[in-house]
Image (cartoon, rainbow, N blue to C red):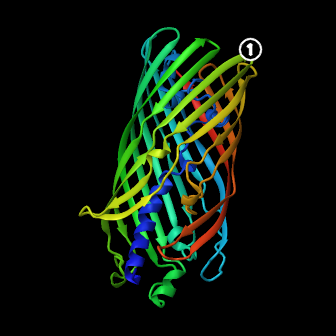
Amino acid sequence: MNQKNLLKKSALAAAVAIVSSNVYAAGFQLNEYTAAGLGRSFSGEGAIADTAASGSRNPATMTMFDRPAFSIGAVYVDPDVSVTGKSPVTGASTDAGNIAPNQWVPNIHFIMPLNDQWALGASATSNYGLATEFNDNYPAGPIGGETDLMTINNNISAAYRFNEHFSFGVGFDAVYAKAKIRRTAGELAPLKTGGLIAEDTEAAKLKGNEWGYGWNAGILYEVDDNNRYGFTYRSEVKIDFDGEYRNGIPRALGGTGGQTVPGSLTLNLPEMWEVSGYNRVAPKWAVHYSLAYTSWSQFQELKATGSNGQTLFQKEEGYHDAYRIALGTTYYYDENWTFRTGVAFDDSPVPADNRTISIPDQDRFWVSAGTTYAFNKDASVDVGVSYMHGQTVNISEEVAAGAPKYEFQAKGTAMLYGANFNYSF
């Protein structure tokens, strides 16, 4: 492969492959849609129905509300993610700390019971999102750089109660996604071009925003007032990005010379299944639990095309399905105070061979605690906090075809803080 094509294809790989693999990283399949759920590690979410946020998780739970309910809040994510390593070319350090910036994840929910059988709901949350950033002069620039993905899931739903035991709900999802990817040339560019391309040259910049659509459904089975179980499904959402791509590499070397060109890529946000349970085991105590299963195996191949239908990039990904298991307990202290806690385990769907430093995905453990203070029968505030610990992983990654592989070790933790205000009319 000549030098011109090597630079051109590595830039395309950086701009297209990385944005897609980031979207599919389980570490950024967000759960942070309510502070109450955060305080119990999101255990039993499809069956508890303690705030209006439950309608966005399992629409069937809306039949448990006998008056309009509203909830608004946010979760603040404070991650600490770092990578360590050495360049196989120069021996220079490739260490980078705090590559994931802090983020706010807002949420808003509303449930309107129409009568004893019907209820409607609406919500705005985020199910996917990420952000990582490396310095412009990072040695492995083509696989570092800046990555930013934001999604907003706007949901409307309806629920119907068949009888005192069974309820069913269905919803429609309109997902807005906005992505920005930026990569730099890295240390190999000056060596391969005789200094014509600097280390901090913009090697790839891709951005776009599009809408995708899906649906969700749920069933709630109420054994009695103290025991209930939920089953929920959220469909796959396809987002067809028609984005803008450019780089600062001269045209003579296969770049765009700063000119913006079009490109398209389909992102498939995978379907998810969840079973949940809630049991009031004593007058003041309850236990709750969940098992979620995400069909990441739907993502086996990545393919991007140009404006003329030509294949710009094609890569086998080979993701596998992954699960999340959570267990928690709630203590109803009195009419004003409620306390909760929980633990969870997130399984990573990314094969070790496909990990990338832009999103060093890994299995994660959660420990959480939270409380609710009710001012009266109408208004309350939820507060939750979680500690998320990721396993240390090894990453072996190419910056370009034919180039030496860079070896890294990555580890990450995060603190999450949430608060919601709830009001019933």
Q: Amino acid at mark 1?
A: Pro
Residue farthest bottom in this picture: 194
Residue at position x 40%, y 64% from top? 206
Relative to 130, does residue 312 appear above or below in the rendering? below
Q: Is residue 67 left or right of residue 334?
A: left
Residue on which the image places disc 1: 283
Picture coordinates of residue 405, whole percent (x, y) = 57, 72
Relative to 118, does residue 194 appear above or below in the rendering? below
Determine whether the residue tagged by mark 1 lies in a helix, strand or loop.
Answer: loop
**Number of disc labels:** 1
Residue at position x 55%, y 48% from top? 349
Compare residues 101 and 22 and report the one nearer the observer: 22
Residue at position x 55%, y 23% from top? 230
Picture coordinates of residue 156, whole percent (x, y) = 40, 30
Picture coordinates of residue 255, whole percent (x, y) = 36, 77
Relative to 333, does residue 345 appear above or below in the rendering? below
Residue 202 found in image quarter: bottom left
Residue farthest top in this picture: 164
Residue 276 found in image quarter: top right
Q: Is residue 97 visible?
A: no
Q: Is residue 139 left or right of residue 211?
A: right
Q: Is residue 359 visible?
A: yes
Picture coordinates of residue 170, whole percent (x, y) = 41, 26
Relative to 27, does residue 68 appear above or below in the rendering? above
Compare residues 356 and 412 and report the one nearer the observer: 356
Q: Residues within 10 Å of mark 1 (few under 14, many from 20)?
A: few
Compare residues 198 and 359 and report the one nearer the observer: 359
The quarter in which the N terminus is drawn is bottom left
Residue at position x 71%, y 27% from top? 329
